[in-house]
Amino acid sequence: MGFTLFHQGCPTSHTQKFLPTMAVAFHGLNTPAGLKKLDEYLITRSYITGYQASKDDITVYSAIPGAPSSDLVNVTRWFKHIDALLRISGVTGEGSGVTIEGFAPVAEAVATPPTGDTKAAAAADDEDDDDVDLFGEETEEEKKAAEERAASVKASSKKKESGKSSVLMDVKPWDDETDMKKLEEAVRGVEMEGLFWGACKYYIAFLFSALCLLVALLSLQGSLSLAEAKERTKLMFLSKLVAVGYGIKKLQIMLTIVDDLVSVDTLIEERLTVEPINEYVQSCDIVAFNKI
């Protein structure tokens, strides 16, 4: 189940002087799978076809049994918008043509809102002809629909940014004369949206539980003291200087990133190994990378 695009007319040239007409076919809009496909289709579109509401939107709107689930962010946004247009001003665009499996095309009258007294409406239109403002302000309903759409897009963005990863990184100095305290201060001074120096609180809780189990086992074996176990695990929460050789030490530091906002490669290449931090930092290596 899903949708299919059909091209009608000749393909465009590189000048894009003419655009092809797009005919769309949907399947199973009365099923969760069909609505999910429609939601994916509307990710980059405001309307079913074209750049304004048309009879294609009315056809698809009428094929949906009721208000879609709020989990389908894009369908919900589009459905509310078309519903508002039908109640306020109607839809007059012709569209490019849409086909829905197992659903008959809607009647022409659906594209316009119901009217009251025809004579009274005509008289009112005659009086207002001289005051028509093609660029007038939005109505309250239109503003509300726009706000709902913006809120849906914002909520969708938050969902995409929810994945996090925990990274353990080696930061290497130039030589044994590098001030490691200033090196760590420079590293921690790097700020990016979605970047947090240190392990996230959930990861810390998990590691602490694992540490307690490790200490209990090693204490029974007598191979590691409690103080040594705590020291070895300290770098998982904060940072630690590790000897490399010839008096040189490297900084091991943990950081947490939001996957959709921070690339570790970009962090290293564009933030940690460029001026002014490269006065202290010679290179960086990823020791461990774990999804949270």
Image (spheres, grey):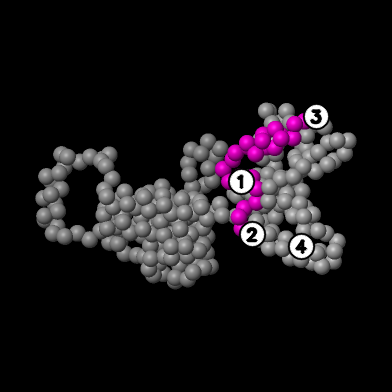
- Packing grade of label 3 (10 A; few <14, some 14-19, many >=20) is few
Q: Is residue 220 left or right of residue 14?
A: right
**Number of the front mark, 3 or 1:** 3
Whole-percent x, y for residue 41 in the image: 50, 56
Q: Is residue 290 left or right of residue 176?
A: left
Which secondary structure lies at badge 4? Answer: helix
- Packing grade of label 4 (10 A; few <14, some 14-19, many >=20) is some
Distance from the alpha carbon under mark 1 to that under mark 2 = 16 Å
Q: Quadrant of the C terminus?
A: bottom right
Whole-percent x, y for residue 178 in the image: 77, 30
Distance from the alpha carbon under mark 3 to that under mark 1 = 28 Å
The type of residue carrying mark 1 is: Phe
The residue wearing badge 1 is: 196
Q: Please report whichever mark, 1 or 4, sits nearer to the chain's N-terminal start.
A: 1
Nearest to the observer: residue 275 or residue 154: 275
Circles 1, 2 touching at the beta carbon (< 8 Å): no
Q: Which residues are magenta?
A: 177-203
